[in-house]
Image: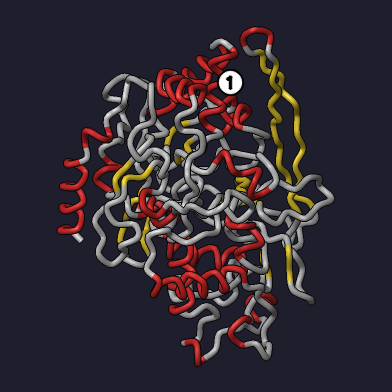
Protein backbone atom coordinates (compact mmCIF):
# COMPACT_ATOMS: atom_id res chain seq x y z
CA UNK A 1 0.00 0.00 0.00
CA UNK A 2 2.85 2.42 0.78
CA UNK A 3 4.21 2.27 -2.76
CA UNK A 4 0.70 2.93 -4.12
CA UNK A 5 0.32 5.99 -1.90
CA UNK A 6 3.75 7.23 -2.94
CA UNK A 7 2.85 6.81 -6.60
CA UNK A 8 -0.41 8.67 -6.09
CA UNK A 9 1.40 11.56 -4.42
CA UNK A 10 3.70 11.78 -7.45
CA UNK A 11 0.58 12.11 -9.59
CA UNK A 12 -0.77 14.78 -7.24
CA UNK A 13 2.47 16.74 -7.36
CA UNK A 14 2.44 16.63 -11.15
CA UNK A 15 -1.14 17.92 -11.20
CA UNK A 16 -0.67 20.52 -8.46
CA UNK A 17 -0.96 23.49 -10.86
CA UNK A 18 -4.28 22.12 -12.10
CA UNK A 19 -5.54 21.95 -8.52
CA UNK A 20 -4.76 25.62 -7.89
CA UNK A 21 -7.70 27.98 -7.69
CA UNK A 22 -8.40 29.76 -10.98
CA UNK A 23 -8.97 33.28 -9.71
CA UNK A 24 -10.07 34.41 -13.18
CA UNK A 25 -13.45 32.57 -13.19
CA UNK A 26 -13.96 33.65 -16.78
CA UNK A 27 -14.08 30.06 -18.03
CA UNK A 28 -14.42 26.56 -16.61
CA UNK A 29 -11.31 24.81 -15.34
CA UNK A 30 -10.03 22.00 -17.57
CA UNK A 31 -12.04 18.84 -17.02
CA UNK A 32 -14.45 20.52 -14.60
CA UNK A 33 -17.49 19.10 -16.37
CA UNK A 34 -16.16 15.56 -15.74
CA UNK A 35 -17.00 15.42 -12.03
CA UNK A 36 -15.90 11.83 -11.68
CA UNK A 37 -12.93 12.03 -14.02
CA UNK A 38 -12.92 9.23 -16.56
CA UNK A 39 -15.65 7.42 -14.61
CA UNK A 40 -18.16 10.18 -15.53
CA UNK A 41 -20.96 8.79 -17.67
CA UNK A 42 -22.52 10.42 -20.75
CA UNK A 43 -26.01 8.95 -20.42
CA UNK A 44 -29.31 10.81 -20.35
CA UNK A 45 -29.87 12.94 -17.26
CA UNK A 46 -33.13 11.32 -16.22
CA UNK A 47 -34.28 9.24 -13.21
CA UNK A 48 -31.48 6.76 -13.94
CA UNK A 49 -28.75 9.41 -13.87
CA UNK A 50 -27.19 7.95 -10.67
CA UNK A 51 -27.45 4.29 -11.72
CA UNK A 52 -24.87 3.91 -14.49
CA UNK A 53 -21.48 2.12 -14.22
CA UNK A 54 -18.12 3.87 -14.37
CA UNK A 55 -17.68 4.97 -17.97
CA UNK A 56 -14.10 3.62 -18.02
CA UNK A 57 -15.12 0.15 -16.82
CA UNK A 58 -13.95 -2.75 -18.96
CA UNK A 59 -16.56 -4.89 -20.70
CA UNK A 60 -15.40 -7.89 -18.65
CA UNK A 61 -16.37 -6.15 -15.39
CA UNK A 62 -19.79 -4.99 -16.52
CA UNK A 63 -21.30 -8.34 -15.57
CA UNK A 64 -20.03 -7.96 -11.98
CA UNK A 65 -21.66 -4.52 -11.86
CA UNK A 66 -24.97 -5.90 -13.12
CA UNK A 67 -24.93 -8.83 -10.70
CA UNK A 68 -24.06 -6.46 -7.85
CA UNK A 69 -26.99 -4.30 -8.92
CA UNK A 70 -29.23 -7.37 -8.74
CA UNK A 71 -28.23 -8.00 -5.12
CA UNK A 72 -28.58 -4.28 -4.32
CA UNK A 73 -32.16 -4.38 -5.65
CA UNK A 74 -33.02 -7.74 -4.06
CA UNK A 75 -35.94 -7.90 -1.65
CA UNK A 76 -34.94 -10.24 1.18
CA UNK A 77 -37.47 -12.61 2.71
CA UNK A 78 -38.12 -14.40 6.00
CA UNK A 79 -36.12 -17.47 6.92
CA UNK A 80 -36.53 -20.36 6.48
CA UNK A 81 -37.45 -20.10 2.82
CA UNK A 82 -37.04 -22.17 -0.32
CA UNK A 83 -35.01 -19.26 -1.72
CA UNK A 84 -32.06 -19.84 0.59
CA UNK A 85 -29.89 -17.31 -1.25
CA UNK A 86 -32.35 -14.53 -0.34
CA UNK A 87 -33.68 -15.37 3.10
CA UNK A 88 -32.75 -14.13 6.57
CA UNK A 89 -34.47 -10.75 6.70
CA UNK A 90 -34.89 -9.29 10.19
CA UNK A 91 -36.52 -10.21 12.49
CA UNK A 92 -36.30 -6.43 13.12
CA UNK A 93 -35.40 -4.19 10.20
CA UNK A 94 -35.73 -0.82 8.47
CA UNK A 95 -35.95 -1.99 4.85
CA UNK A 96 -36.20 -5.19 2.82
CA UNK A 97 -33.52 -4.18 0.34
CA UNK A 98 -30.72 -1.67 -0.26
CA UNK A 99 -32.69 0.00 -3.06
CA UNK A 100 -35.62 0.70 -0.73
CA UNK A 101 -33.51 3.30 1.12
CA UNK A 102 -31.26 4.38 -1.75
CA UNK A 103 -34.07 4.68 -4.29
CA UNK A 104 -32.59 4.93 -7.79
CA UNK A 105 -29.20 5.02 -6.00
CA UNK A 106 -30.06 8.49 -4.78
CA UNK A 107 -31.00 10.41 -1.68
CA UNK A 108 -33.55 9.46 0.98
CA UNK A 109 -36.15 11.77 2.48
CA UNK A 110 -38.21 12.23 5.64
CA UNK A 111 -41.73 10.80 5.71
CA UNK A 112 -44.33 13.26 4.42
CA UNK A 113 -46.29 12.93 7.66
CA UNK A 114 -46.22 10.98 10.90
CA UNK A 115 -48.83 8.64 9.41
CA UNK A 116 -46.33 7.53 6.75
CA UNK A 117 -43.76 4.83 7.49
CA UNK A 118 -40.16 6.05 7.36
CA UNK A 119 -38.27 3.93 4.81
CA UNK A 120 -35.24 5.93 3.65
CA UNK A 121 -34.71 7.57 7.05
CA UNK A 122 -34.15 6.17 10.54
CA UNK A 123 -32.93 7.11 14.00
CA UNK A 124 -29.48 6.26 15.35
CA UNK A 125 -29.46 5.41 19.07
CA UNK A 126 -26.71 5.48 21.69
CA UNK A 127 -25.97 6.38 25.30
CA UNK A 128 -23.00 8.03 27.03
CA UNK A 129 -20.46 5.54 28.42
CA UNK A 130 -21.64 4.22 31.76
CA UNK A 131 -18.40 2.83 33.17
CA UNK A 132 -14.63 2.66 32.66
CA UNK A 133 -14.89 -0.37 30.41
CA UNK A 134 -17.18 1.46 28.00
CA UNK A 135 -15.03 4.60 28.11
CA UNK A 136 -11.95 2.51 27.28
CA UNK A 137 -13.81 0.85 24.41
CA UNK A 138 -14.65 4.23 22.92
CA UNK A 139 -11.10 5.51 23.39
CA UNK A 140 -9.72 2.46 21.59
CA UNK A 141 -11.92 3.36 18.59
CA UNK A 142 -13.11 -0.25 18.37
CA UNK A 143 -16.62 1.20 18.56
CA UNK A 144 -17.93 4.64 17.70
CA UNK A 145 -20.80 4.68 20.21
CA UNK A 146 -22.31 2.70 23.08
CA UNK A 147 -25.64 1.35 21.75
CA UNK A 148 -28.88 1.81 23.67
CA UNK A 149 -28.98 -1.35 25.84
CA UNK A 150 -32.47 -2.53 24.81
CA UNK A 151 -32.95 -1.11 21.31
CA UNK A 152 -29.39 -1.28 19.98
CA UNK A 153 -27.75 1.12 17.55
CA UNK A 154 -30.77 2.21 15.55
CA UNK A 155 -34.55 2.22 15.81
CA UNK A 156 -36.03 -0.49 13.58
CA UNK A 157 -39.59 0.34 12.67
CA UNK A 158 -40.49 -2.91 10.88
CA UNK A 159 -40.62 -6.52 12.04
CA UNK A 160 -41.45 -9.98 10.75
CA UNK A 161 -44.75 -11.64 11.60
CA UNK A 162 -44.76 -12.71 15.24
CA UNK A 163 -42.30 -10.03 16.29
CA UNK A 164 -42.87 -6.51 17.59
CA UNK A 165 -41.34 -3.52 15.81
CA UNK A 166 -39.17 -1.32 18.02
CA UNK A 167 -41.12 1.87 17.55
CA UNK A 168 -42.06 4.70 15.21
CA UNK A 169 -40.22 7.94 14.56
CA UNK A 170 -42.28 11.10 15.13
CA UNK A 171 -41.22 14.46 13.68
CA UNK A 172 -42.66 17.86 14.54
CA UNK A 173 -41.54 20.94 12.58
CA UNK A 174 -41.37 24.58 13.61
CA UNK A 175 -40.98 27.27 10.94
CA UNK A 176 -38.22 29.83 11.57
CA UNK A 177 -38.27 32.96 9.34
CA UNK A 178 -34.98 34.29 7.96
CA UNK A 179 -34.54 37.82 6.56
CA UNK A 180 -32.32 38.03 3.50
CA UNK A 181 -30.97 41.08 1.70
CA UNK A 182 -33.13 43.19 -0.60
CA UNK A 183 -36.30 42.22 1.24
CA UNK A 184 -36.13 38.54 0.31
CA UNK A 185 -37.61 36.12 2.82
CA UNK A 186 -36.78 32.51 3.62
CA UNK A 187 -38.05 30.04 6.18
CA UNK A 188 -36.32 27.13 7.86
CA UNK A 189 -38.18 24.18 9.33
CA UNK A 190 -36.70 23.12 12.66
CA UNK A 191 -37.43 19.47 13.47
CA UNK A 192 -38.01 17.88 16.86
CA UNK A 193 -37.83 14.09 17.14
CA UNK A 194 -39.52 11.62 19.44
CA UNK A 195 -40.38 7.93 19.39
CA UNK A 196 -43.86 6.47 19.69
CA UNK A 197 -45.12 2.90 20.19
CA UNK A 198 -41.99 1.57 21.92
CA UNK A 199 -42.18 -2.19 21.60
CA UNK A 200 -39.70 -3.27 24.29
CA UNK A 201 -40.24 -0.93 27.19
CA UNK A 202 -38.69 2.39 28.08
CA UNK A 203 -35.34 3.50 26.66
CA UNK A 204 -32.33 4.41 28.77
CA UNK A 205 -32.89 7.81 30.43
CA UNK A 206 -29.74 9.19 28.75
CA UNK A 207 -30.54 7.93 25.26
CA UNK A 208 -29.29 10.10 22.40
CA UNK A 209 -31.06 9.96 19.04
CA UNK A 210 -29.88 11.16 15.67
CA UNK A 211 -31.97 11.15 12.47
CA UNK A 212 -30.30 10.05 9.24
CA UNK A 213 -31.53 9.94 5.65
CA UNK A 214 -29.90 7.63 3.13
CA UNK A 215 -27.19 9.53 1.22
CA UNK A 216 -26.71 9.21 -2.57
CA UNK A 217 -24.50 6.35 -3.75
CA UNK A 218 -22.62 8.04 -6.60
CA UNK A 219 -18.83 8.39 -6.48
CA UNK A 220 -18.22 6.29 -3.37
CA UNK A 221 -15.31 4.40 -4.90
CA UNK A 222 -13.65 7.68 -5.88
CA UNK A 223 -13.97 9.07 -2.35
CA UNK A 224 -12.47 5.83 -1.04
CA UNK A 225 -9.53 6.28 -3.44
CA UNK A 226 -8.49 9.77 -2.28
CA UNK A 227 -5.11 9.28 -0.53
CA UNK A 228 -5.31 9.58 3.25
CA UNK A 229 -2.32 11.95 3.21
CA UNK A 230 -4.21 14.34 0.94
CA UNK A 231 -7.16 14.47 3.35
CA UNK A 232 -4.96 14.87 6.42
CA UNK A 233 -3.11 17.73 4.70
CA UNK A 234 -6.38 19.68 4.73
CA UNK A 235 -6.96 19.13 8.46
CA UNK A 236 -6.43 22.01 10.87
CA UNK A 237 -7.99 20.81 14.14
CA UNK A 238 -6.53 23.67 16.19
CA UNK A 239 -7.19 26.34 13.53
CA UNK A 240 -3.48 27.11 13.36
CA UNK A 241 -3.98 29.43 10.39
CA UNK A 242 -6.66 31.44 12.22
CA UNK A 243 -9.24 31.30 9.42
CA UNK A 244 -11.99 29.99 11.70
CA UNK A 245 -12.07 26.62 9.93
CA UNK A 246 -10.76 23.68 11.97
CA UNK A 247 -11.56 20.48 10.13
CA UNK A 248 -10.39 17.31 11.83
CA UNK A 249 -10.17 13.70 10.66
CA UNK A 250 -12.47 11.01 11.97
CA UNK A 251 -10.72 7.88 13.28
CA UNK A 252 -12.64 4.59 13.32
CA UNK A 253 -12.01 0.86 13.54
CA UNK A 254 -11.62 -1.03 10.27
CA UNK A 255 -13.19 -4.48 10.39
CA UNK A 256 -11.24 -5.40 7.25
CA UNK A 257 -7.81 -4.22 8.43
CA UNK A 258 -8.32 -4.81 12.18
CA UNK A 259 -6.89 -1.40 13.01
CA UNK A 260 -7.82 2.27 13.32
CA UNK A 261 -8.23 4.02 9.98
CA UNK A 262 -9.51 7.28 8.55
CA UNK A 263 -13.30 7.47 8.51
CA UNK A 264 -14.78 8.57 5.19
CA UNK A 265 -18.41 7.42 4.88
CA UNK A 266 -21.59 8.24 6.74
CA UNK A 267 -22.85 11.61 7.96
CA UNK A 268 -20.15 11.68 10.66
CA UNK A 269 -17.55 9.71 8.67
CA UNK A 270 -18.08 6.74 10.96
CA UNK A 271 -17.01 4.08 8.45
CA UNK A 272 -13.63 3.67 6.69
CA UNK A 273 -14.58 1.74 3.53
CA UNK A 274 -17.36 0.95 1.08
CA UNK A 275 -17.29 -2.74 2.04
CA UNK A 276 -17.68 -2.02 5.76
CA UNK A 277 -20.41 0.52 5.08
CA UNK A 278 -22.24 -2.14 3.05
CA UNK A 279 -21.79 -4.84 5.71
CA UNK A 280 -23.00 -2.59 8.52
CA UNK A 281 -26.05 -1.60 6.44
CA UNK A 282 -26.87 -5.26 5.79
CA UNK A 283 -26.77 -5.89 9.56
CA UNK A 284 -28.39 -2.74 10.92
CA UNK A 285 -30.94 -2.01 8.20
CA UNK A 286 -31.96 -5.54 7.20
CA UNK A 287 -30.75 -7.91 9.92
CA UNK A 288 -28.45 -9.83 7.56
CA UNK A 289 -25.08 -11.32 8.47
CA UNK A 290 -21.84 -10.95 6.48
CA UNK A 291 -18.24 -12.05 7.14
CA UNK A 292 -17.48 -8.51 8.38
CA UNK A 293 -20.54 -8.28 10.64
CA UNK A 294 -21.48 -11.92 11.40
CA UNK A 295 -24.71 -11.20 13.28
CA UNK A 296 -27.59 -13.29 11.95
CA UNK A 297 -30.00 -11.33 14.14
CA UNK A 298 -28.66 -7.96 13.04
CA UNK A 299 -29.03 -5.20 15.63
CA UNK A 300 -31.07 -7.28 18.11
CA UNK A 301 -29.92 -7.04 21.75
CA UNK A 302 -29.96 -9.51 24.68
CA UNK A 303 -33.13 -7.76 25.86
CA UNK A 304 -34.85 -8.93 22.64
CA UNK A 305 -34.54 -12.68 23.15
CA UNK A 306 -37.32 -13.62 20.74
CA UNK A 307 -35.39 -11.85 18.00
CA UNK A 308 -32.16 -13.66 18.89
CA UNK A 309 -33.94 -17.03 18.96
CA UNK A 310 -35.75 -16.61 15.64
CA UNK A 311 -34.76 -18.73 12.59
CA UNK A 312 -32.14 -17.11 10.37
CA UNK A 313 -30.89 -17.55 6.85
CA UNK A 314 -27.31 -18.54 7.61
CA UNK A 315 -26.58 -21.72 5.66
CA UNK A 316 -23.53 -24.03 5.48
CA UNK A 317 -23.40 -23.66 1.69
CA UNK A 318 -22.89 -19.91 2.29
CA UNK A 319 -20.35 -20.42 5.09
CA UNK A 320 -23.09 -19.80 7.66
CA UNK A 321 -23.74 -16.23 6.50
CA UNK A 322 -26.88 -14.77 5.01
CA UNK A 323 -24.75 -12.54 2.75
CA UNK A 324 -21.58 -14.49 1.90
CA UNK A 325 -18.29 -12.84 0.97
CA UNK A 326 -18.88 -13.17 -2.77
CA UNK A 327 -22.17 -11.30 -2.53
CA UNK A 328 -20.70 -8.62 -0.26
CA UNK A 329 -17.86 -8.16 -2.77
CA UNK A 330 -20.32 -7.78 -5.66
CA UNK A 331 -22.48 -5.26 -3.81
CA UNK A 332 -19.35 -3.32 -2.79
CA UNK A 333 -18.10 -3.35 -6.40
CA UNK A 334 -21.46 -2.03 -7.55
CA UNK A 335 -21.43 0.71 -4.91
CA UNK A 336 -17.86 1.76 -5.80
CA UNK A 337 -18.70 2.08 -9.46
CA UNK A 338 -21.91 4.08 -9.57
CA UNK A 339 -20.79 6.82 -11.91
CA UNK A 340 -21.12 10.58 -11.58
CA UNK A 341 -23.22 12.43 -14.14
CA UNK A 342 -21.50 15.29 -15.97
CA UNK A 343 -21.78 18.88 -14.77
CA UNK A 344 -24.31 21.05 -16.58
CA UNK A 345 -23.82 24.59 -17.87
CA UNK A 346 -20.22 24.85 -16.67
CA UNK A 347 -19.51 27.72 -19.09
CA UNK A 348 -22.72 29.65 -18.39
CA UNK A 349 -21.86 33.20 -17.23
CA UNK A 350 -24.23 33.04 -14.25
CA UNK A 351 -22.81 29.66 -13.19
CA UNK A 352 -19.26 31.01 -13.44
CA UNK A 353 -20.27 34.05 -11.40
CA UNK A 354 -21.85 31.72 -8.83
CA UNK A 355 -18.61 29.77 -8.66
CA UNK A 356 -16.75 33.00 -7.85
CA UNK A 357 -19.30 33.78 -5.12
CA UNK A 358 -18.88 30.23 -3.75
CA UNK A 359 -15.13 30.74 -3.34
CA UNK A 360 -15.25 34.34 -2.15
CA UNK A 361 -17.89 33.50 0.47
CA UNK A 362 -15.60 30.88 2.00
CA UNK A 363 -17.65 27.80 1.06
CA UNK A 364 -14.63 26.14 -0.55
CA UNK A 365 -12.78 26.17 2.78
CA UNK A 366 -14.65 22.97 3.68
CA UNK A 367 -16.19 21.95 0.36
CA UNK A 368 -12.79 21.38 -1.29
CA UNK A 369 -13.59 21.37 -5.01
CA UNK A 370 -11.20 18.78 -6.42
CA UNK A 371 -8.90 15.90 -5.54
CA UNK A 372 -6.71 13.40 -7.36
CA UNK A 373 -7.23 9.76 -6.47
CA UNK A 374 -4.46 7.30 -5.67
CA UNK A 375 -2.89 5.04 -8.26
CA UNK A 376 -4.67 1.72 -7.64
CA UNK A 377 -3.80 -1.07 -10.10
CA UNK A 378 -6.47 -3.36 -8.59
CA UNK A 379 -9.15 -0.66 -9.06
CA UNK A 380 -8.36 0.86 -12.45
CA UNK A 381 -11.69 2.70 -12.70
CA UNK A 382 -10.86 4.89 -9.70
CA UNK A 383 -7.11 5.04 -10.24
CA UNK A 384 -5.37 8.40 -10.79
CA UNK A 385 -8.53 10.41 -11.51
CA UNK A 386 -9.00 14.18 -11.15
CA UNK A 387 -12.40 14.43 -9.47
CA UNK A 388 -14.66 17.25 -8.26
CA UNK A 389 -16.61 16.11 -5.18
CA UNK A 390 -16.59 19.43 -3.25
CA UNK A 391 -15.67 17.91 0.11
CA UNK A 392 -12.62 17.60 2.35
CA UNK A 393 -14.06 14.47 4.08
CA UNK A 394 -13.24 16.11 7.42
CA UNK A 395 -15.36 16.80 10.50
CA UNK A 396 -16.47 20.39 11.11
CA UNK A 397 -18.45 22.02 13.89
CA UNK A 398 -21.71 23.12 12.26
CA UNK A 399 -23.15 24.91 15.26
CA UNK A 400 -26.12 24.36 17.55
CA UNK A 401 -28.71 24.61 14.79
CA UNK A 402 -27.57 21.38 13.15
CA UNK A 403 -26.28 19.65 16.30
CA UNK A 404 -27.74 16.24 17.09
CA UNK A 405 -25.90 16.29 20.46
CA UNK A 406 -24.83 12.68 19.86
CA UNK A 407 -21.06 12.08 19.69
CA UNK A 408 -19.82 9.44 17.27
CA UNK A 409 -16.17 8.41 17.41
CA UNK A 410 -14.08 11.57 17.19
CA UNK A 411 -17.11 13.62 16.12
CA UNK A 412 -18.79 15.75 18.76
CA UNK A 413 -22.52 16.32 18.95
CA UNK A 414 -22.22 19.34 16.64
CA UNK A 415 -19.63 18.02 14.16
CA UNK A 416 -20.44 16.54 10.77
CA UNK A 417 -18.42 15.34 7.81
CA UNK A 418 -18.42 17.81 4.91
CA UNK A 419 -21.03 16.39 2.57
CA UNK A 420 -19.96 15.98 -1.08
CA UNK A 421 -21.91 18.33 -3.32
CA UNK A 422 -21.54 16.51 -6.63
CA UNK A 423 -24.88 15.44 -8.05
CA UNK A 424 -26.85 17.75 -5.74
CA UNK A 425 -28.53 19.53 -8.65
CA UNK A 426 -30.04 16.29 -9.99
CA UNK A 427 -31.69 15.22 -6.72
CA UNK A 428 -35.14 16.27 -7.91
CA UNK A 429 -34.66 14.60 -11.30
CA UNK A 430 -33.61 11.29 -9.74
CA UNK A 431 -35.62 11.22 -6.51
CA UNK A 432 -38.49 13.63 -7.07
CA UNK A 433 -37.62 15.89 -4.13
CA UNK A 434 -35.02 18.44 -3.05
CA UNK A 435 -34.67 17.60 0.67
CA UNK A 436 -31.10 17.99 1.92
CA UNK A 437 -28.89 17.70 5.04
CA UNK A 438 -28.57 14.69 7.33
CA UNK A 439 -32.26 14.63 8.21
CA UNK A 440 -33.80 16.18 5.11
CA UNK A 441 -34.94 19.29 7.01
CA UNK A 442 -33.76 21.62 4.23
CA UNK A 443 -36.30 21.77 1.42
CA UNK A 444 -33.86 23.18 -1.12
CA UNK A 445 -30.26 24.28 -1.53
CA UNK A 446 -30.82 27.75 -0.06
CA UNK A 447 -32.31 26.33 3.13
CA UNK A 448 -29.36 23.94 3.42
CA UNK A 449 -26.95 26.88 3.22
CA UNK A 450 -28.95 28.87 5.78
CA UNK A 451 -28.75 26.03 8.31
CA UNK A 452 -24.95 26.29 8.34
CA UNK A 453 -23.48 27.59 11.59
CA UNK A 454 -20.38 27.08 13.70
CA UNK A 455 -17.33 27.13 11.43
CA UNK A 456 -19.60 27.98 8.49
CA UNK A 457 -21.41 30.85 10.23
CA UNK A 458 -19.36 33.56 8.53
CA UNK A 459 -19.98 32.06 5.08
CA UNK A 460 -23.69 31.75 5.84
CA UNK A 461 -23.86 35.38 6.96
CA UNK A 462 -22.21 36.50 3.73
CA UNK A 463 -24.85 34.63 1.74
CA UNK A 464 -27.62 36.36 3.70
CA UNK A 465 -26.11 39.82 3.20
CA UNK A 466 -25.02 39.55 -0.45
CA UNK A 467 -27.02 41.10 -3.30
CA UNK A 468 -29.84 38.89 -4.56
CA UNK A 469 -28.15 38.55 -7.96
CA UNK A 470 -25.07 37.05 -6.30
CA UNK A 471 -27.18 34.71 -4.20
CA UNK A 472 -29.13 33.56 -7.26
CA UNK A 473 -25.85 32.93 -9.09
CA UNK A 474 -24.52 30.92 -6.15
CA UNK A 475 -27.61 28.70 -6.15
CA UNK A 476 -27.39 28.32 -9.93
CA UNK A 477 -23.78 27.15 -9.56
CA UNK A 478 -24.62 24.68 -6.78
CA UNK A 479 -27.49 23.25 -8.81
CA UNK A 480 -25.12 22.73 -11.75
CA UNK A 481 -23.09 20.23 -9.72
Q: Is 415 on the left or on the right of 305, as rendered?
A: left
Relative to residue 289, is residue 86 drawn left or right? Answer: right
Name the one closer to the observer, 65 or 58.
Answer: 58
| Residue sitting nearer the eye, 124 or 313 | 313
Farthest top residue in view: 182
Placement of 222 over or under 31, stated as above or below: below
Can residue 225 be spotted in the picture? yes
Q: Position of residue 227 (x, y in %)?
A: 27, 49
Q: At which x and y percent is residue 292? A: 43, 71
Q: Position of residue 357 (x, y in %)?
A: 46, 19
Q: The N terminus lies in which quarter of the figure?
A: bottom left
Residue drawn where x is 56% and y is 77% of the image: 296
Q: Quadrant of residue 465?
A: top right
Name the residue rendered at 45%, 41% in the picture: 417
Residue lying at the far right of the rendered structure = 115
Q: Is residue 120 above or below residue 429?
A: below
Dividing the picture into quadrants, the one containing residue 184 is top right
Q: Position of residue 6 (x, y in %)?
A: 16, 52
- Residue closest to the eye, 3 or 405: 3
Q: Which residue is mark 1?
A: 472
Classify mark 1: helix, strand or loop.
Answer: helix
Q: Residue at x 63, y 28 (%)?
A: 447
Instruction: Report the number of discs.
Output: 1
Residue 137 shows up from this direction: no
Residue at 37% x, 58% y: name it.
253
* Mark 1 Cα-neighbour bin, 10 Å: few <14, some 14–19, many ≥20: some
In the rendered image of this protein, does residue 315 appear above or below residue 143? below
Which color scheme did the rendering employ for the protein?
secondary structure
Amino acid sequence: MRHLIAASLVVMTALAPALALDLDFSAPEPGEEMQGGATTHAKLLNRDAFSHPSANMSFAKEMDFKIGNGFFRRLWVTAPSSTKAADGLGPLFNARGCQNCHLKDGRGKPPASNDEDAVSMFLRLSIPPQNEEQRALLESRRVNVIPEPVYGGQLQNFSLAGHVAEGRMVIEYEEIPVELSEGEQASLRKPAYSIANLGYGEMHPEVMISPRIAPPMIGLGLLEAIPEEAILALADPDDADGDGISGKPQRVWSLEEDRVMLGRFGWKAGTPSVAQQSAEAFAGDMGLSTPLVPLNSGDCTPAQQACLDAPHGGDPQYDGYEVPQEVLDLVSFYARNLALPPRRDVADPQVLHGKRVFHESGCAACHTPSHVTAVLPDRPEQSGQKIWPYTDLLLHDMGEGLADNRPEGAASGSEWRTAPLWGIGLTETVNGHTYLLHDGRARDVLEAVLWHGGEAQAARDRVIAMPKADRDALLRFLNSL
